[in-house]
């Protein structure tokens, strides 16, 4: 295929496979996920939680839109590869700015973060508009997306120039704009709205990409627990905490990957409207799943550091809240696939939340064990069903 030809991804089993270019691209997001977990760990407060949540949305959104992009355009075509590497560089800058995006060592870091995010969103979508120049329907669709990307990016950059509460307010507004675009179908002056049937994605590829991001989050969890354990003096209770953290990661993996990942791939691959399913089940409902894993990784680090210490409220929120968030997100994901709510996952989430009032009376290692048992119970019940 020549550089001037439209570098579309063909809809075949071979072409639907995730490429090495995409896996290489994901390395930046391994770094970004680690930065987010360290940000939350360094500021275990409501302000820290809000900051981490807002920045996670931006990281996830940048990655997700690139996943949509590579679903349409083959990453092994030279022009697409050039775009991906440029986005990867901007993503590296964005990830490096995460710890001080809301202020800290440098006032310009928040602006650098916002500019890098804007470059990713506008540059990648602008490339899609160019690649679709001979396909009017698809080009119009990406012109609508570009309009919304540019609108949100301008508010992100304005927030980068602001300080204190003004930055929070502007970036929250930008997040609302980002999240509102897909469900509103990107209404744009002179172009109207998109239709989900125009988002003709390859369900198999899209599902696999989201599954791989969850592997990134789980991998970061194991990396954090191993690094924390190795940096502290050896004790048997600390070793037990490491084992529980590992089993918790296995339980998360089992709930998601044992059968549900394959079912999700099959459902979206055979859907009559894969674009709508990709938007709901994968773009939106995978966000709390990933967030739950990241929050739980912070809880694991706290447990390994002080397995028999006092359970502070930040530790309780990360240990029990992370698992509850993961299960609630997975229940939404399954509902989007089947329109049936998973009662066992909702009950399990409720149990974890119900334990919180008495949690200060229990040491962190007991709370971690309880969270692991609850998630493992969901995995076993899902397997039996």
Image (cartoon, rainbow, N blue to C red):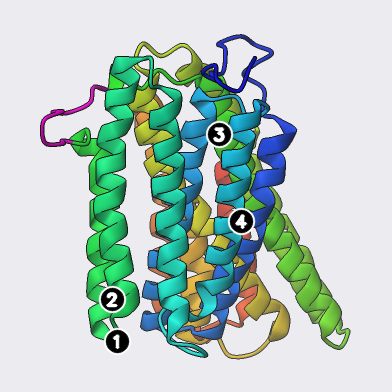
What secondary structure is marked by label 2? helix
Let me know if residue 193 is in the magenta part. Answer: yes
Return the disc, 4 or 1, that comes first in the chain's sequence.
Answer: 4
Q: Residue at x 48, y 83 (%)?
A: 44
What secondary structure is marked by label 4? helix
Where residue 185 sits in the image (x, y, percent)? 22, 33
Compared to residue 164, the image places residue 178 above or below, namely above
Residue 126 visible from this viewpoint: yes
| Residue at mark 4 | 89
Magenta-drawn segment: 187-195
Mark 2 is surrounded, within 10 Å at the Cα level, by few (under 14), some (14 to 19) or many (20 or more) other residues, namely some
73 sits left or right of 145 in the view: right
44 sits left or right of 275 in the view: right
Nearer to the camera, 232 or 191: 191
Where residue 254 sits in the image (x, y, percent)? 65, 41
Quadrant in the picture for residue 279: top left
């Amino acid at each position: 295929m020549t550089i001037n030809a439209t570098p579309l991804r063909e809809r075949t089993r071979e072409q639907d496979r995730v490429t090495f270019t995409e896996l290489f691209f994901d390395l930046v997001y391994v770094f970004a996920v680690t930065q987010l977990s360290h940000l939350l760990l360094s500021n275990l407060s409501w302000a820290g939680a809000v900051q981490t949540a807002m920045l996670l949305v931006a990281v996830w959104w940048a990655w997700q839109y690139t996943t949509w992009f590579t679903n349409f355009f083959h990453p092994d075509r030279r022009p697409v590869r050039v775009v991906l590497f440029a986005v990867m560089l901007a993503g590296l800058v964005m990830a490096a700015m995460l710890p001080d995006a809301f202020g800290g060592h440098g006032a310009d870091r928040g602006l650098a973060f916002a500019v890098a995010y804007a470059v990713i969103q506008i540059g990648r979508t602008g490339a899609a508009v160019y690649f679709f120049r001979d396909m009017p329907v698809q080009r119009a669709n990406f012109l609508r997306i570009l309009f919304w990307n540019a609108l949100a990016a301008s508010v992100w950059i304005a927030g980068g120039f602001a300080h204190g509460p003004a930055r929070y307010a502007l970036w929250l507004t930008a997040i609302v704009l980002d999240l509102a675009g897909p469900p509103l179908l990107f209404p744009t002056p002179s172009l109207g709205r998109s239709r989900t049937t125009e988002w003709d994605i390859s369900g198999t590829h899209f599902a696999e990409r989201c599954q791989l991001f969850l592997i990134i989050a789980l991998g970061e969890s194991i990396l954090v627990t191993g690094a924390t354990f190795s940096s502290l003096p050896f004790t048997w209770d600390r070793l037990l905490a490491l084992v529980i953290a590992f089993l918790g990661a296995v339980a998360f993996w089992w709930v998601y990957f044992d059968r549900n990942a394959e079912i999700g791939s099959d459902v979206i691959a055979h859907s009559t409207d894969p674009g709508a399913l990709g938007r709901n089940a994968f773009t939106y409902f995978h966000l709390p799943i990933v967030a739950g894993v990241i929050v739980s990784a912070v809880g694991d680090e706290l447990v390994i550091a002080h397995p028999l210490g006092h359970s502070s409220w930040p530790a309780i929120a990360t240990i029990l809240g992370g698992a509850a968030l993961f299960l609630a997100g997975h229940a939404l994901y399954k509902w989007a696939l089947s329109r049936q709510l998973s009662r066992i996952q909702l009950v399990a989430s409720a149990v974890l939340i119900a334990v919180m009032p008495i949690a200060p009376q229990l040491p962190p290692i007991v709370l971690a064990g309880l969270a692991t048992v609850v998630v493992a119970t969901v995995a076993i019940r899902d397997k039996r069903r």
